[in-house]
Image (cartoon, rainbow, N blue to C red):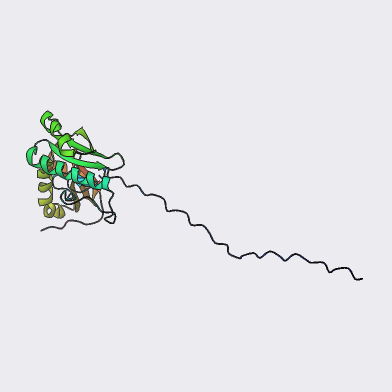
Amino acid sequence: MAPPARRHPRPATVTANPPRRRRPAPAVLTAGVVCCLVVAVLAGCGTVGGAGGTEPTPATGPPASPNSGKSPGQAELDRSATRIDEYLRTNFPDHYAGIVVDQPRSTIIVYRRRSAELDAALPALAGGHVRVEPRDAPHSAMDLRKLADRVQADIEYWSTQGVTITSVAVRPDGTAVEVGTRELARARTNLPQRYGAAPLDIIESNPTLLTPG
């Protein structure tokens, strides 16, 4: 009697390109600190600026919906920042310099010249779970805005002097008016001769944002 045939195991099937597991996209955290803050043009850095700065997000309206692109916490920060910005511009123009929204810390940083009355008004303006952090500023946004307006009015004059002014920005921390120019060395020599000891920070900036006239 013949022996039974031996069965050979069937070879395993190997997929040339096995399916890959998709990794979840990393969470992206955005910060509103000017720090900008720049972020900031004309006394506004980050989400909300001071006088003459980036216009704040309107404070009115319902909380952010799931499809609005903003979390409820971020929307609350924006609304609180807007209330503070508008109130201080109107009621404390000699003290208020600007604000910066620090989203990761749920904090609104308020730059101001010291005023006990201003500081006392901040918690009620912020509301909710928003933290407010007052910080000292050497100048108000109103005073720096006057200086910035003067520089802007002189753009045509400076072009005749070989200095191209490309940007003018009031810093939200109340430290200076930032002036951008292509001719850095010449501007740093000539602008103080015209504006004296005014708080100007002259930086090199190539894009032409402002034109004479």
Q: Quadrant of the C terminus?
A: bottom left
Side of 20 relative to 93 (left or right)? right
x and y percent of residue 53 in the render? 17, 48
x and y percent of residue 37 in the render? 25, 44
Q: How many marks?
A: 0
Q: Nearer the viewer, residue 104 or 165?
A: 104
x and y percent of residue 87 in the render? 11, 41
Considering every residue shown, the one lying at the far front of the view is 1
Side of 126 relative to 72 (left or right)? left
Residue 107 seen by the camera: yes
Q: Quadrant of the N terminus?
A: bottom right
Query: Which residue: 28% across, 43% down?
Result: 103
Side of 105 relative to 172 (left or right)? right
* Residue 74 higher or lower than 13, as above or below: above
Residue 43 seen by the camera: no
Considering every residue shown, the one lying at the far left of the view is 91
Q: Nearer the viewer, residue 177 or 202?
A: 177
Q: Nearer the viewer, residue 94 or 184?
A: 94
Place residue 76 in its image quadrant: top left
x and y percent of residue 177 in the render? 17, 43
Query: Which residue: 88% across, 68% down?
Result: 3
Considering every residue shown, the one lying at the far right of the view is 1
Considering every residue shown, the one lying at the far bottom of the view is 2
* Residue 81 higher or lower than 206, as above or below: above
